[in-house]
């Protein structure tokens, strides 16, 4: 995981929880239970994925636990909060870049194997930009006012 400044700006209470998660990571990490790893973690795990596109939807098919994620283009998030493992993904095009806004997470996934975590107020913005025929640049902005 890459973090600007190399330190996640946790609130004081969250530092203690991350340390507890780290100490018990062998049994607490959702990945160790084959649960869906959440966003953005599933995208940078060491397993391949495919991207399919229709005019109204981009679908990400992940090898890990055969996960599927639909990104609805130019469509608003549904009202209210829904606790989903992978969040609710809504996209738009900014030139050649697919910008995906993801909300409505549960708080049961981690960002990595070291116990970095989030709350159900996690907000993720992903940017997928083609570099050439075989490569993408993947950038993520993460906000969570409950945790950091």
Image (spheres, rainbow, N blue to C red):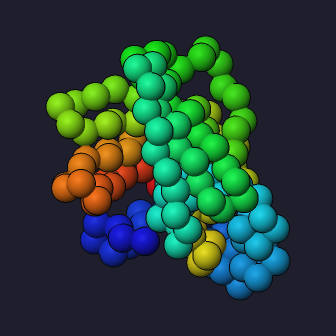
Q: Residue at x 71, y 68 (%)?
A: 31
Residue with the most extreme front position: 133
- Residue 97 relative to residue 52: left or right: left
In the rendered image, residue 98, in percent from the top left (x then y), is placed at 32, 37
In the rendered image, residue 65, in percent from the top left (x then y), is placed at 72, 59
* Image quadrant in which you'd find residue 120: top right
Q: In which quarter of the image is the N terminus?
A: bottom left
Q: Which residue is drawn at 24% across and 49% down?
A: 130
- Residue 50 relative to residue 88: left or right: left
- Residue 144 relative to residue 25: left or right: left
Q: Which residue is drawn at 32% across and 45% down?
A: 127
Query: Toward the viewer: 127 or 148?
Result: 127
* Image quadrant in which you'd find residue 87: top right
Question: Is residue 9 something one can see in this rendering?
Answer: yes
- Residue 28 relative to residue 94: left or right: right
Establish if 65 lies above or below 71.
below
In the rendered image, residue 44, in percent from the top left (x then y), is placed at 47, 64
In the rendered image, residue 16, in percent from the top left (x then y), is placed at 63, 73
Question: Is residue 143 something one can see in this rendering?
Answer: no
Q: Residue at x 59, y 17 (%)?
A: 78
* Image quadrant in which you'd find residue 26: bottom right
Query: Toward the viewer: 104 or 139?
Result: 139
What number of labels is visible? 0
């Amino acid at each position: 995981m890459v973090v600007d400044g190399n330190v996640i700006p946790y609130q004081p209470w969250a530092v203690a929880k991350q340390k507890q998660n780290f100490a018990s990571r062998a049994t607490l990490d959702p990945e160790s239970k084959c649960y869906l790893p959440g966003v953005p973690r599933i995208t940078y795990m060491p397993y391949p994925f495919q991207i399919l596109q229709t005019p109204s939807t981009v679908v990400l098919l992940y090898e890990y636990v055969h996960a599927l994620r639909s990104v609805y283009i130019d469509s608003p998030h549904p009202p209210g909060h829904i606790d989903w493992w992978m969040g609710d993904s809504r996209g738009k095009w900014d030139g050649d870049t697919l910008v995906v806004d993801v909300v409505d997470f549960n708080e049961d996934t981690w960002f990595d194997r070291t116990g970095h975590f989030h709350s159900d107020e996690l907000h993720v913005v992903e940017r997928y930009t083609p570099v050439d025929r075989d490569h993408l640049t993947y950038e993520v902005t993460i906000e969570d006012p409950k945790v950091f």
